[in-house]
Amino acid sequence: MSFGGDVALVTGATRGIGEATAKLLAHRGAHVLVSGRDEERGHRVVDDIRAAGGTADFLPASLADATHCQALVAEALDAAGRVDILINNAAIGTFGATPAIPEVDFDACYALNVKAPFYLVGALAPAMVSRGRGVIVNVTTMVASFGTAGSAVYASSKAALNHLTKCWATEFGPHGIRVNAVAPGPTLTENAKAVFGEDGLTKMMRQAPARRAATPDEIAETIAYLASDRASFIHGAILPADGGRAAT
């Protein structure tokens, strides 16, 4: 599973699943464009990649609107000339009872979780089409496919991204672009542990065959598989990486 010669842009790559994915793709030969808001963390991820023998650049980005997305694409093209693999990982987890969600939080969640991938794909896919190759992997969530109290905003935003995955697979697949998504279950990232606690994440998986939360590296391996040529005949799939929760 080699990515030698490929350029990969990973959003939300300064921590968690994004960081693990950036490091894995770099380890397997990709030149990785590490994107995120935290410059200190971003430079640390790049330093780690370079220390391990890989190549990477940090591109700071907030992805608050279409203009910011287009600016990130311009920086990516300036840094590497092209993007062969786009990993739409950056996200906000907005949770709470529906009547209690402020409009500003709703808008921020949809802006990052739906609008940003939409405009990044819109800016990058045409060049992929002209080259006749490219891969897009969207990171969604298991709760996009079933109801859970308190996650209406987050889950619905990721359900929208699941459907965009299928629409883009249909739109760009005939031109050599593969578009798929990974739907993780609870994962032991810093953010998730801060919000739910490690015990809370484990409790979420009581009904799942795995009976435990994932590590970021396990999700990164799934993302890397879909980005690789080994998944060459997979288009428009929403691949659960949820310890079997979707089966229960």
Image (cartoon, helix red, strand yellow):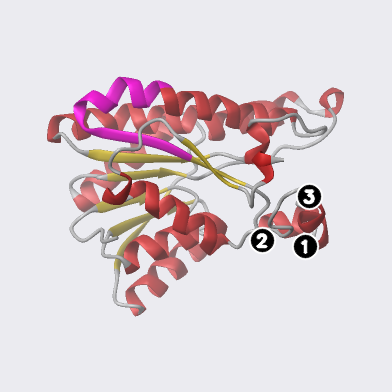
Query: Which residue shows up at 41% across the image and 74% down it?
Result: 48
Tag shown at residue 188: 2
> Up-down: is 189 above or below 93?
below
Which of the two residues, 72 or 21, is positioned nearer the viewer here?
21
Disc on the earlier residue, 3 or 2: 2
**Helix or strand or loop: what does disc 1 sit on?**
helix
Counting residues from the start of the chain, the first of labels 1 and 2 encountered is 2
Count residues near mark 3 (Cα–Cα under 10 Å), then give few for <14, some for 14-19, many for 20+: some
Q: Quadrant of the C terminus?
A: top right
Q: Is residue 15 visible?
A: no
What is the spatial separation of the Cα atoms under label 3 and label 2, in whole angstroms?
12 Å
Query: What span is in magenta?
Result: 167-181
Q: What kind of residue is marked 1?
A: Glu
Query: Against 177, is 215 above or below?
Result: below
Element under disc 2: loop
Q: Main secondary structure of the magenta part?
A: helix
Residue placed at 29% from the left, 71% from the top? 54
> Dot 2, how many residues are within 10 Å of its Cα: few (below 14), some (14-19), or many (20+)?
many
Marking on residue 204: 3
Residue neighbourhood size for the residue with mark 1, other residues' Cα within 10 Å, grouped as few (<14), some (14–19), many (≥20): some
Amino acid of disc 2: Leu
Q: CA distance from mark 3 to mark 1?
A: 10 Å
**How many numbered discs, if any?**
3
Q: Which residue has dot 1 on it?
A: 198
Q: Earlier in the sequence, mark 3 or mark 1?
A: 1
- Residue 2 percent coordinates (x, y): 26, 61
Name the amino acid type tagged 3: Met
* Residue positioned 55% across, 24% down in the render: 160
Look at the numbered discs 1 and 2 and tell me whether their residues touch, using CB distance below 8 Å. Answer: yes
